[in-house]
Amino acid sequence: MSTRRRKNKGVFRSLTADVIVVGGGPAGMMAALTAAEQGARVCLMERNQKVGRKLYITGKGRCNVTNDTDVAGVLANLPRNSRFLTSAVTRFPPASVQAFFEKLGVPLKVERGGRVFPVSDKAADVVDALFGALRRARVELLEDRAEGLLLEDGAVRGVRGVHGTVRGKAVVLATGGASYPLTGSTGDGYAMAAAAGHTIIPPKPSLVPLEAAGEDCRRMQGLSLRNVAVRVKNQKKKVVYAEQGEMLFTHFGVTGPLILSASAHMREFEKDRYTVWIDLKPALDEEKLDQRLLRDFAAQPNRAFHNVLEGLLPRLMVPVMAERCGIPGDLSVNGVTRAQRRRLLEELKGFRVDITGPRPIAEAIVTSGGVKVSEVDPHTMASKKLPGLYLAGELLDVDGYTGGFNLQVAWSSGRAAGESAALFCAEDRE
């Protein structure tokens, strides 16, 4: 089969392959490469002109390819259906992913939190390496949008595209979720999986910025907080997430690593309410923080309250904090009452942000929901509904936290799907 990319401006003749992979994202590219390595003739259908488009924007353009942890570490960072991926991640863990990219000529480095990036800090290097590997493996790259599965005699026999049909013995659906639709993740795979008999758990945004009530966040937009502790409580006052790290105020609410990870635990906006509590001084308990306030006030008794606050907080936060405490900004600190100081202490240790909901799914890093995992073989990624069909990546109802875990899911599930699809074709030939 030709290694050149087919660009379709009209109807193309019917093509044939052993394995047809739908979706040129990380899971799809890994599935295509793996199937080709097993000796299968592979056709990779991608609606965009370039494969790996979503990879270009991961890790803020640096591509956080995985996390430098073990299998247990990966599974602990998948809040939804982690057990389903035990086999796939065990067979292709983070260490194997790193070795895979190093072998492709992409040197890697490990940063804070175990995040693994290319040394160059360029996502394009990861995409180029994968594209080169696809060419060397003689994978047919077909630029076309899949419209549906070709079903015959109770099995999948190919894929119908806008410009023609590709017939094959096995199909891997790796179309992604519904996040970042401009990269090609428009949710088309859900309809194809449903047509094959699969149950689709309604997609919701995960790892998504959050909208907040009131004007305080907007007034502090652009302010980044580091080394703060965040707790998220539901309306029953139960803590559903707690972690320390970085976050950012925006014109609509809050975002940043802490908030994106927290959003993965906030799945019931239709029937629950969530509040983010920010500890601005997590290194100090209340007693030590109160002692610091007393020292600061005593050292500058005649200074205005807002000036003293600037020694404790970023400038953008000062007027908001003063209003929340009910203390005039121009009041001399020697006029601050004990009750007012107590109120300041409470705000520093628990700055409240009432969340009204997530941003649209188009702004989410990943999609929660998708194909019900109980209908997929966890060892092979094979559909239990339709022989010859395999599913991988974000299309499945699995998602992880930030830090390289979602790409690890894509690599591991894509590897399993590609290997199994190639084996299925080999057995069919025999």
Image: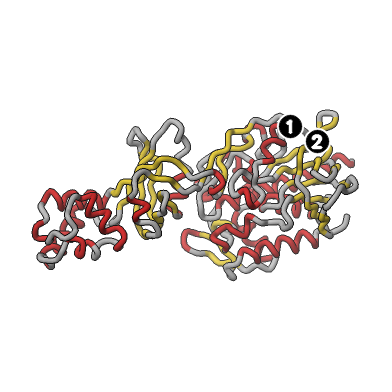
Task: Tell whether label 1 touches label 2 (CB within 8 Å).
Answer: yes
Residue 382 in percent (x, y) is at 72, 38
The answer to whether any part of residue 426 appears in the image is no
The answer to whether any part of residue 15 appears in the image is yes
Residue found at x 35% / y 36%: 238
User: How dense is the environment of label 1, judged by Cα within 10 Å: few (below 14), some, or many (20 and up)?
Assistant: many
Instruction: Identify the image quadrant of the N terminus.
Output: bottom right
Q: Quick check: 408 left or right of 147?
A: left
Residue 275 in percent (x, y) is at 35, 41
Tag 2: amino acid: Val
Given residues 94 and 320, the one toward you in this image is: 320
Whether residue 271 is situated above or below residue 287 in the rendered picture: above
Residue at image mark 2? 156
Whether residue 359 is situated above or below residue 52 in the rendered picture: above
Tag 1: amino acid: Ala
Q: Tell me which numbered mark, 2 or 1, is placed earlier along the sequence.
A: 2
Q: Secondary structure at mark 1?
A: loop
Q: Quadrant of residue 94?
A: bottom right
Residue found at x 34% / y 55%: 219
Give the image's coloring scheme.
secondary structure
Residue 69 in percent (x, y) is at 53, 55
Q: CA distance from mark 2 to mark 1?
A: 9 Å
Which mark is on residue 87? none
Q: Secondary structure at mark 2?
A: strand
Instruction: Identify the image quadrant of the C terminus.
Output: top right
Q: Quick check: 36 left or right of 70?
A: right
Q: Quick check: 247 left or right of 122?
A: left
Residue found at x 68% / y 56%: 52
Residue at image mark 1? 196
